[in-house]
Image (cartoon, helix red, strand yellow):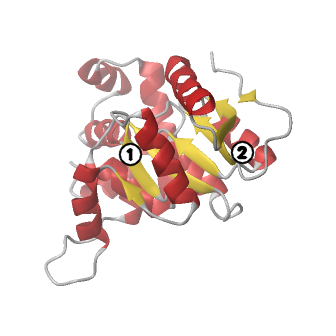
Amino acid sequence: MTDTPDVTTGAEEPGMIRVFLVDDHGLFRSGVRAELDRRVPDVTVVGEAGSVDEAVAAIRHLRPDVVLLDVHMPDGGGAEVLRQLRPELPDVVFLALSVSDAAEDVIAVIRAGARGYVTKTISGSELADAVRRVKSGDAVFSPRLAGFVLDVFSERPGAAPPGDPELDLLTRRERDVLRLLARGYAYKEIAGELFISVKTVETHVSSVLRKTQLSNRYELSRWASDRRLV
């Protein structure tokens, strides 16, 4: 069961930064909303959603200034929201807010168009400052993430090589499923190996097929082998 997107109605004060929350954990969204709405006078939360489809529809309707975007969600996560909305809403700024500090997660959403990436260990005041900064055009990263982001996206000699743009679109869990699929595991075996349901495996495979624009598991296996995931 997915959460119904929550949209705040009514006029906001001039100069307020309008924020939309995307996270599949309702309790976390409630905490962020309370922190920003009650304690930050120049920021207001205009809506929230717990899934990609809900988020895309609501953001298109509301056109917020800043979207706080979770990276991992069951139906595709932050990179998928960005893929659908970034080209058509260039004035909306996306800031990833995630529990993950994995390099592949950071790189995937930055490549997809996020303006920054902060982890959920951030304080309320730091989050408010990050919202203001991305709204004004700055790129914002949690301190420990900034270094490798600069390395990956720098063109200077000795910088880390850029990743595969298609591979960067996959979440860590999607890569895990794909790796086992390419090794010949059946869906039931993948589910047992990763401690998830067969239905969840099917969902991840469908998502990978959509993102890679491939047709079946055999093409996926070859694709994964070419990228040395096996």
Horizontally, is 223 left or right of 27 in the view? left
Indicate which disc, 2 or 1, sits on the residue closer to the N terminus: 2
Image coordinates of residue 56 in percent, x first then y, are 69, 43
Q: Name the residue rendered at 80%, 45% in the picture.
A: 61
| Horizontal side, residue 100 vs residue 79: left or right | left
- Work out whether 151 lies above or below 177: below
* Residue toward you, 20 or 183: 20
Callout 2 crowding tier (Cα within 10 Å): few <14, some 14–19, many ≥20: many
Label 2 is placed on what type of residue?
Answer: Ile
Q: Secondary structure at mark 2?
A: helix
Residue occupying image coordinates x 56% and y 63%: 136
Q: Nearer the viewer, residue 34 or 84?
A: 34
Residue 108 at x, y percent in the picture: 40, 55
Three-letter code for the amino acid on which mark 1 is drawn: Val
Which residue is at the front of the view, 36 or 59?
A: 36
Picture quadrant where residue 3 is located? top right
Q: Which residue is mark 1?
A: 118
Look at 44% across and 38% down and name the residue there.
125
Dot 1 falls on a residue whose secondary structure is strand
Q: Which residue is at a point 46% across and 50% down the rendered structure image?
A: 130
- Does residue 53 lie above or below 109 as drawn? above
Q: Which residue carries the number 2 mark?
A: 59
